[in-house]
Image (cartoon, rainbow, N blue to C red):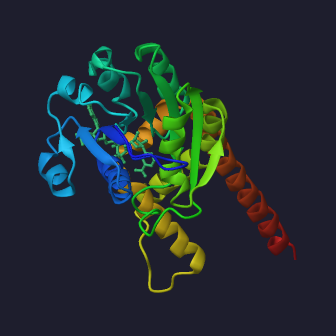
Amino acid sequence: MSVSTSSSRTLKIGLVGFGPFGQFLAKTMIKQGHILQATSRSDHSQLCHHLGISFFREEREFIEADNDVILICTSILSLSQVLNNLPLHFLKRPTLIAEVLSVKEHPRNVLLQVVPEEMDLLCTHPMFGPESGKNGWQDLTFVYDKVRIRDEATCSSFLHIFQSEGCKMLEMSCEEHDKIAARSQFLTHTIGRTLSEMEIESTSMNTKGFETLVQLKENSVRDSFDLFSGLFIYNRFAKQELQNLELALEKVKQKLLQKMEEQSSIESKP
Ligand SMILES: NC(=O)c1ccc[n+]([C@@H]2O[C@H](COP(=O)([O-])OP(=O)(O)OC[C@H]3O[C@@H](n4cnc5c(N)ncnc54)[C@H](OP(=O)(O)O)[C@@H]3O)[C@@H](O)[C@H]2O)c1
């Protein structure tokens, strides 16, 4: 299987889902010398061939290809369907099943249901993507929850991929992640998508603040709508944050209207 060093070893990693984020992760893993294999709904065999990755159209062949780690990189919305179609009972030996979805309680629950008991489970969320991580991963946050780990060596070799790139490693429960992410990442995406609905564009007289908004809009629409809606549908804390945002906007509006009334009464005094 693997070449050993003191703290980490070369891993054979099987990616399930070779979309934008799977491809982004694969490039760094290959650079580090790991051996990659992939399977996905669409045919990515040409790109995989170009990157030196074995691409499997047959899920059973992929599962039997002796991976140390199977890394789930599929969309949040398709997770249940993808996992239910993956013949995990054909795994030949204990394997680390890890995932990178941007919500955490949902994949943890699904994995606990469908993954055979002898397989280890690691839930993770790299808090960056192809845009924010395009110049390297130094100081970017990597959240993880060791849901069911017995083979510490494989798990720490996998975590080392991110640690060695300079990521800030943050261990927390899936529940805590979702609470914080609803109030940070989901809020960010929602405001970005709202600005996109308003069709804001760069002007000839941008303030720095407005430039930040235009950037936020552009970054938000670069991610798929499946990803954004997954943040809402599969994070039980997100609905409350959407309500908080609506209430906050209404409060700001009321404050402005109240001030306008006060101002007009001042101006109408003789
Ligand atoms: N983009 C980011 O910055 C980022 C950061 C951290 C974590 N993540 C997580 O990484 C995962 C992948 O994200 P992404 O940016 O690549 O975009 P995405 O739109 O969330 O997911 C695209 C991936 O899902 C697969 N997929 C979509 N619908 C499917 C279906 N019905 N059946 C089977 N497979 C399906 C696609 O397969 P095909 O390509 O084969 O069609 C592709 O591999 C998501 O769970 C996301 O939350 C993303």
Q: Is residue 56 left or right of residue 19?
A: left
**What x and y, as percent, mark residue 39?**
23, 36
Q: Is residue 147 above or below residue 38?
A: above
Q: Residue at x 33, y 40 (%)?
A: 12
**What x and y, as percent, mark residue 33?**
35, 55
Q: Residue at x 28, y 22 (%)?
A: 86
**Total marks drawn?**
0
Quarter location, residue 145: top right
Q: Quadrant of the N terminus?
A: top left
Locate ligand 1 by image quadrant: top left
Q: Quadrant of the C terminus?
A: bottom right
Q: Is residue 92 above or below residue 132?
A: above
**What x and y, as percent, mark residue 119?**
45, 21
Q: Residue at x 46, y 66 (%)?
A: 136
Q: Is residue 95 left or right of residue 86?
A: right
Q: Nearer the viewer, residue 107 or 9?
A: 9
Q: Nearer the viewer, residue 223 or 149?
A: 149
